[in-house]
Amino acid sequence: MYPADLVMPMKAELTQNGFTDLPTVEEVKTFLEKKGTTLIVVNSVCGCAAGGARPGVVYSLDNDKKPDHLGTVFAGFDIEATTVAREAMMPFPPSSPSVALFKDGELVHMLERHHIEGHSPAMIAENLKQAYNEYC
């Protein structure tokens, strides 16, 4: 498990941009039951989360259509909550970072680590905006 003083600034990159921190199993389950569209980010300490995923997800919100609900769990810190979020992302294998879009609780779009690693924040944002335009 990562120390809180390392993780909190990385969490803040999303929570300061409208994402709800979901550190418990109960919070993840309740969040995924919401009607409408829900975006869940599995955050992480890796370089591709810092250089691609977090900024890309934030940039993606500059769009006419966007998810109704924004949430995040942190791999290696919110361990049980992350497990529950990943279970909802099946059949995709666990991946950190990753981004999942749900509509009325059903997974409709997924970005795995290999869709993030080596891609610019602008490319990640564009991928997500296309999904928002289709599902939101």
Image (cartoon, grey):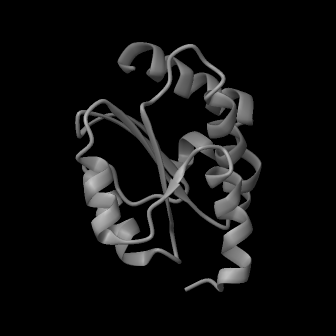
Q: Is residue 17 left or right of residue 93?
A: right
Residue 89 appears in the picture as rendered: no
Quarter of the image with the C terminus is top left
- Where is residue 103, by image quadrant? top left
Q: Position of residue 88 (x, y in %)?
A: 26, 52
Tell me the residue at 55%/48% (across/down): 19
Residue 13 appears in the picture as rendered: yes
Tell me the residue at 40%/66% (across/down): 82
Taking depth in this image into account, of 82 and 68 the one nearest to the observer is 68
Taking depth in this image into account, of 9 and 42 the one nearest to the observer is 9
Tell me the residue at 35%/76% (across/down): 80
128 up-or-down from 18: above or below? above
28 up-or-down from 91: above or below? below
Q: Position of residue 126 (x, y in %)?
A: 62, 22
Q: Position of residue 50 (x, y in %)?
A: 74, 55
Tell me the residue at 46%/14% (across/down): 133
Quarter of the image with the N terminus is bottom right
Q: Is residue 9 left or right of residue 131?
A: right
Q: Position of residue 14 (x, y in %)?
A: 64, 51
Q: Is residue 49 left or right of residue 25?
A: right
Total residue callouts? 0
- Where is residue 11, by image quadrant? bottom right
